[in-house]
Image: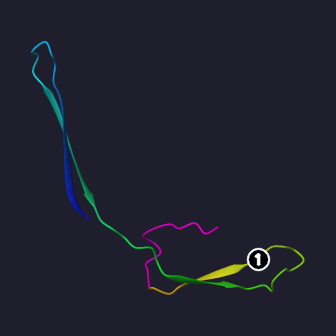
Amino acid sequence: QGEYEVTITAGYPNGEPACTYVANTSYVAVSAPVFEAVVLESSFNPGGVYTVEVINVSGFNSTLEDYEFA
């Protein structure tokens, strides 16, 4: 977590002035939400399709990030 800077300098053997590029970025660690998954159908139902209810246990604001469950 923090602020980072990278400097790239290209030097030329024929004496031309060096070219420099600077890039800045910040990194913030975010933990995954804690959730509970409840399967609403009984095991091995004939249709083979199951509905799962995902309960947000951690109070995570789900509008901030998208998660895919598989």
Q: Secondary structure at mark 1?
A: loop
Q: Decide which of 47, 2 is in the foreground and name it.
A: 2
Which quarter of the picture shows residue 26?
A: bottom left
Q: Nearer the viewer, residue 5 or 53?
A: 5
Q: How is the model colour-coded?
A: rainbow
* Side of 29 relative to 26 (left or right): right
**Residue type, label 1:** Tyr
For residue 63: magenta? yes
Kindly identify which residue carries mark 1: 50
Query: Compared with residue 10, is residue 68 higher up or lower down, i.e. above or below?
Result: below
Q: Residue at x 36, y 70 (%)?
A: 30
Q: Is residue 24 left or right of residue 41?
A: left
Residue at the spot 40% in from the left edge and 73% down from the top edge: 31
Image location (x, y in percent) of residue 67: 53, 68
Q: Can you name the residue that lies furthest to the top here? A: 14
Q: Does 10 sit above or below residue 68?
A: above
Q: Is residue 55 above or below residue 4?
A: below
Q: Is residue 25 left or right of residue 60?
A: left
In the image, residue 2 lies at what x, y percent? 22, 62
Tell me the quarter of the picture where residue 53 sits: bottom right
| Range shown magenta | 59-70
Residue at the far right in the pictured view = 46
Q: Residues within 10 Å of mark 1 (few under 14, many from 20)?
A: few
Residue lying at 81% horizontally and 86% vertically, measured from the top left: 42
Q: Overall secondary structure of the magenta stretch?
A: loop
